[in-house]
Amino acid sequence: MFDLVECVETKPEGDVEYTVSVVPTSWIRNGHCYWPHYSAGKTSKSVKCADAPDFDAWKFYPARSLGTFGNYANINRYTCI
């Protein structure tokens, strides 16, 4: 399963950045989305393969789910990302 999530990141200067991403549902825990420290290409592959998250090593951001989908292909039918 995959979720379309909106993550919130507060920058050191106080600016707030909102990002919408597709992630495996397993990357979401307790209102946070965990995100790996990988290159963009490796992260994209990790998402599509629904790799298990490393809750001890990955950064996490406050997040809310905008929708849950049965597989990665279904998300592309309903979104523009």
Image (tube, rainbow, N blue to C red):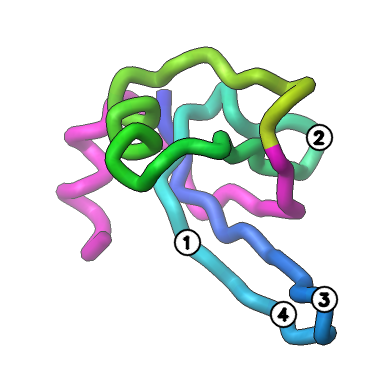
- The answer to whether the residues at label 3 and label 4 have Cβ atoms under 8 Å apart is no
Q: Nearer the viewer, mark 3 or mark 4?
A: 3
SS type, badge 2: loop
SS type, badge 1: strand
Q: Which residue is mark 2?
A: 30
Q: CA distance from mark 2 to mark 4?
A: 20 Å
Q: Nearer the viewer, mark 2 or mark 4?
A: 4
- Determine the residue positioned at 53% across, 28% down: 25
Q: Which residue is mark 3?
A: 12
Screen quadrant of the C terminus:
bottom left
- Residue type, label 1: Val
The mark that comes first in sequence, 3 or 2, is 3
The mark that comes first in sequence, 1 or 2, is 1
Q: CA distance from mark 4 to mark 1?
A: 13 Å
Q: Whole-percent x and y of residue 66?
A: 52, 54
SS type, badge 4: strand
Q: CA distance from mark 1 to mark 3?
A: 20 Å
SS type, badge 3: loop
